Amino acid sequence: MLRPRCEITRWPMSSSVRRPGATSGIKGDGRHWLWKGCFMLAIGAAIGSLCAQRAPLAQGVDVERLREVIRCDDCHREIAREWRASGHARAWTNPTYRAFIAENPTSEETCLPCHAPKLILSAGLSAMPELRAAARERGVDCIACHADRDFVMHGPFQTRAPHKTQKDERYRSVRACLPCHGQGRWFNQVDDWKTSRYARLGITCQTCHMPGIERPSVQHWALPDMPKRVTRRHTFLGSRDRDFVRSAASLQMRVENRLAIVSVTNSATGHALPGAGWRAVVLDVVVEDGRGNVTLHRRHSFDLDVHDNRLKPGERRDFRYALPVETGLVKAKLIYKLFYEWPDDKGMVMATREIRF
Ligand code: HEC
Ligand code: HEC
Ligand code: HEC
Ligand code: HEC
Ligand code: HEC
């Protein structure tokens, strides 16, 4: 008779599965019978539900289904709270994404791999992820990023946990982001980053998008003495965060010899500005005469739409305008738009400058 390969039943309890030499965050196995018990209950439920389905088990446990039963947020509470508020958690439910798919139903297959991915470790970190069938509404979730086929959690530390863990240096590097953020023309921040000074200085995607914070990576009443580590917030800050976006660029202006010189600098973005394909940054310059009448209005959009004219990391671009009047006011405004087709007044103001002359 075929015996299902329920390998997963072994790992949470058996100390023999722990890698020799793993540094322990948890001292004394006996003290932790309680949370191990809790975890076993969760695993039990998982195995129970999986064992009810003979087909996947005949080929081994279907790790992809475990996301429906194992709740990472029971233990990694703060990380889970941060992730839930991030774009990754909304990758599949995001109304803008749904609207695109509704208009082009056949594109679902080509779009989903990144928006509802299988384990990125099973496709390999240099390949595009594969599309998953189960629980797509969870978007880019914990398991997609951390678990391998044997349900070992890869991460930046040597830890001892109720699940298997493996220290994997790639998680500290851009390789953890490459499967979805290093593809083609539209979904690519990695290529620009590689040639920037950030790469040379070892400033990674995580440095800016997952700010470091010292804390235990687990918050559970039965795990009171977890070590504090320099962990990373799973907020994946992006264009929805006003302060973050405003920090990306700087706007300078000066008036010399009846000339207004406006400079826009990509001062703090580790890749092209704006980072994502359909965003736009707009420079809007207006010159008014002494009575407030507009005598000049110029507008430049930086985007990927037709020609990629976005600002490279560190790049400064100067714009010169001949002032049409002797006295008046020159005003410059930098606007960030989520979609380049939007009218400018729907965007967010990143910076403004004014000079009377
Ligand atoms: C019963 C509690 C518990 C649950 C549930 C749990 N973990 Fe953990 N996990 C831990 C503990 C304890 C550690 C070790 C923490 C430390 O030492 O800092 C850990 C460590 C980790 C690490 C760090 C590994 C490393 O080498 O850096 C990752 C990643 C991780 N867990 C992911 C997950 C994911 C994903 C899930 C859900 C599938 C999950 N965990 C569910 C308790 C749990
Ligand atoms: C988009 C991929 C991605 C997702 C989604 C994700 N993580 Fe992580 N996680 C990472 C990376 C990358 C690191 C290591 C960052 C570093 O050290 O530079 C990390 C680190 C960790 C660590 C080690 C402690 C720390 O903060 O460095 C734990 C524990 C962890 N993640 C748990 C989780 C849990 C639980 C979830 C779901 C709520 C989750 N992760 C979702 C990519 C992800
Ligand atoms: C290679 C992985 C990948 C594929 C394939 C992919 N996306 Fe995305 N998508 C991303 C990433 C990464 C982002 C985050 C911003 C960026 O880099 O453009 C994103 C963001 C989006 C957003 C913006 C959501 C918002 O509100 O800001 C929409 C909409 C979207 N994708 C739709 C699609 C559609 C439609 C397809 C299929 C034609 C698709 N995606 C295919 C990775 C992917
Ligand atoms: C499995 C695919 C995948 C991986 C791996 C991945 N991302 Fe994403 N990421 C996405 C998708 C899809 C979106 C678009 C989500 C949406 O619809 O808004 C996104 C969005 C983002 C955003 C914008 C979030 C927002 O709220 O606007 C940031 C920032 C980001 N990712 C950073 C990272 C970083 C840093 C890493 C590496 C540690 C990483 N991602 C790894 C797929 C991925
Ligand atoms: C020096 C800091 C810094 C580094 C390094 C960095 N970014 Fe960004 N990133 C930003 C800032 C600031 C923004 C917001 C402005 C913009 O759209 O460019 C941003 C925007 C993004 C966006 C678009 C978010 C959205 O919602 O539209 C994605 C996706 C992204 N970054 C991914 C990455 C990835 C992947 C890497 C690593 C290859 C990376 N970033 C490296 C600072 C950084």
Image (spheres, rainbow, N blue to C red):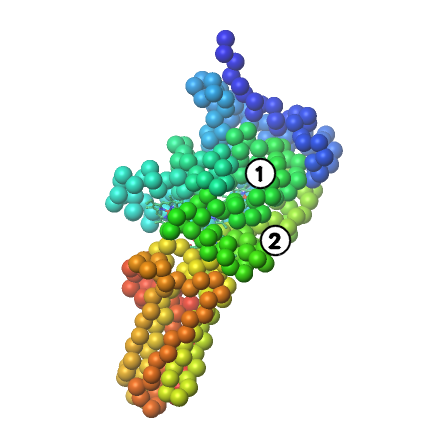
Q: From the Cβ of disc 1, is ligand 1 less than 8 Å away? A: yes
Q: Is residue 351 above or below residue 192?
A: below
In which quarter of the view is residue 333 placed? Answer: bottom left
Residue 55 percent across, percent down from the top left: 43, 19
The quadrant in which the C terminus is found is bottom left
Label placed on residue 213: 2
SS assignment at label 2: strand
Q: Is residue 354 visible?
A: no
Kindly report the distance in space between the C-alpha atoms of the residues bearing marks 2 and 1.
19 Å
Is residue 278 rendered to the left or right of residue 241?
left
In which quarter of the view is residue 288 placed? Answer: bottom left
- Residue closer to the observer: 72 or 329: 329
Amino acid, disc 1: His
In which quarter of the view is residue 118 placed? Answer: top left
Residue beneath label 1, please? 154
What residue do we see at 39% from left, 32% from top?
133
Q: Is residue 350 above or below residue 180?
A: below
Q: Residue furthest bottom?
A: 326
